[in-house]
Image (tube, helix red, strand yellow):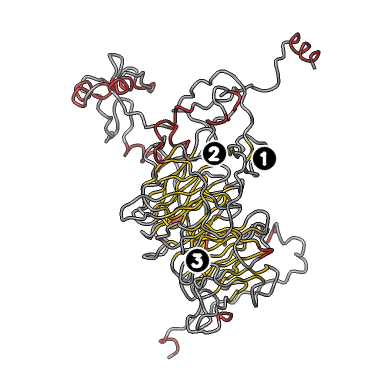
Amino acid sequence: MADEDEMMRMMGISGFGKAKQAKKVDVHTFDKSLRVRALTRRVIPTPNTASQPAPAPKPATPPFVPEVDSDDDDEPGPKPAPQPAAGPSSAPAPAADFVEPEFDPDENGDDDDDDAPLFPITHELVLKDHSKVLSAIAMEPSGARMVSGAHDYELKMWDFGGMDERAKPFKSWEPAGSYYVNDIKYSQAADMFLVISATMQAKLYDREGEEKGMFMKGDPYLRDMHHTAGHVAEMTSCAWHPYETQQFITSSADSTIRIWDVENRRKQKTVIVVKSKERGARTKVTHCAYSYDGGIIGGACLDGALHMWNSSSNFVRPNLSIEGAHTKGTDTGSVVFAMDGRTVITRGGDDTVKTWDLRAFKKPVATRSGLSTLYPGTNAILSPDEKYIVTGSGATLKGGAGKLHFLKRDTLEVVQELEMLTSVVKVYWHSKINQLVVGLSNGQMSMLYSPLTSVNGAKMVVARGPRKKPTIEDAMQTLLGVPILTPGAQSALADGDESVLTGKRKRERGKIDPRKLRRPELPVSGPGRGGRVGASATQHVVKNLVRDTTRDEDPREALLKYAQLADTDPRWTKAWRETQPKPVFQQEEEKDSDEERG
């Protein structure tokens, strides 16, 4: 290898391609969005409210750092942080030409392991555009765009690449009039997203927010739900199939979960009727979800039951079911499947978070209570490495602050709590950009991130900085710039630059410009003068040179003058001249006058 390098040096070849120096991260660029540290605190684990004892403390978990630079961008996920080595600090990158840099821990050797945050919550970007409770959040798999819905009936689209310091959405509309937006989900291909409002019909939109179609609603007068073509009551949630890009499921208050095909909007593919033990045998399905392999469909109901169906079954009855998973009459906000295929996390409206094992689906593995729930649809999510569960809680007092809780997945012990402005309703953690989006009850969205472990997203907006205001120097530079002159304007502008003149000065200069003062040439009448021929004389000469006499000639006579020539020398009928019969024309009889008849 050394010989090859020496040979290339002697030949004057330094390498192949243009070498670009990677831009480095300047942490101080994001100091303006730093959260107040007094609002963030680590919590000492306390005995859980469940009957099981708390386990012995474990060694500290290494800080969570997502994969930033990888050859395969389609495989996001957590990656253990490498040990930083000693080295000089990097130079700050200009904020105006911000491009997401590559995070190199070797360049930040002055920071030890304690400086890397366990969760990306050190900095915050607040998005203020909704006016009521934020009820739905969805982001593209790439993390470039986000869609949000709230109880103000509006749907808003956000583009981090085109967002300025005002942090405003680029599109906003009402998908279903005066109905709440309950759920939003992006497809696996990120080419469309599904919107579930408090209506009976789901709507499909493309990436730009243009409506692609609306799915059929059912007949509310039919008792048997198997015979209906769609939902007959308010829809609550939806989920896309992990691998079948054209298939998704929806849940509703009509006690059904329906499997749909994107191409068939007239009727669902399959109906899963949920039977309750309550009177009437019906219950509201508050949430539905697919497992990571698509083999299991889960549904949580208002009567507190939790059901599981195999995707390959006939859906007559659930394969796994547990009654009283949560308190009866409370909305279970989320059902989340872990990657291992056997762990399920539920967030109930009874102020609890529970983990379940499908191999022993009789009682919860762990329970965490005391998480105040003020709004239906309050959810819980898994961290990208699936070691922690993140959920929110409401304010205990009117006008009080809510909290964001980070729990251990195995024991549901509180690892860290973060105080928010108001009650927390929705939480979304994007694994690729490693940023948390928290929806609050006042309509705000807080994007939590860390300059060390997060990429793109809110960092692009903050690092872009405020727009530069025009100054007097900029205006003078524009006015004093060299103008672009046309060739015909050189003589008129020989005395000075006309671009700096006012309207009055331009008119005064135009009065002495010989080109502008020249009178247009008038048309000549009569025989002509000065070498120019008048219009009447010209027309007379042309008319006499070429005279058209066809209008004065009889058309019959014009044709008959060629009759003798056709008989003597036929050009086209010479081949059958001998056999051609001689035409006989009818002769006109002379009519006698009345006097001759008499």
Residue 564 seen from this side: no
User: Does dot 1 land on a helix, a strand or a loop?
Assistant: loop
- Disc 1: CA contacts within 10 A as few (<14), some (14-19) or many (>=20): few
Which residue occupies 50% across, 53% down?
A: 138
Q: Quadrant of the C terminus?
A: bottom left
How far, Cα to Cα, is label 1 from label 2?
25 Å
Residue 152 seen from this side: yes
Q: Picture coordinates of residue 347 (x, y %)?
A: 51, 60
Which residue occupies 57% across, 68% down?
A: 306
Q: Which residue is mark 2?
A: 118
Q: Which residue is mark 1?
A: 72
Ranked by sequence position, the earlier of labels 3 and 1 is 1
Q: Quadrant of the N terminus?
A: top right
Amino acid carrying mark 2 in the image: Leu
User: Does dot 2 land on a helix, a strand or a loop?
Assistant: loop
* Nearer to us: label 3 or label 2: 2
Which residue occupies 46% across, 68% down?
A: 330
How far, Cα to Cα, is label 3 from label 2?
39 Å
Which numbered dot is residue 373?
Answer: none
Which numbered dot is residue 202?
Answer: 3
Which residue occupies 44% across, 45% down?
A: 418
Q: Picture coordinates of residue 571 (x, y %)?
A: 70, 57
Amino acid carrying mark 1 in the image: Asp
Horizontally, is 7 left or right of 217 in the view? right
Camera-side residue of 72 and 470? 72
User: Does dot 3 land on a helix, a strand or a loop?
Assistant: loop
Horizontally, is 60 left or right of 555 in the view? right
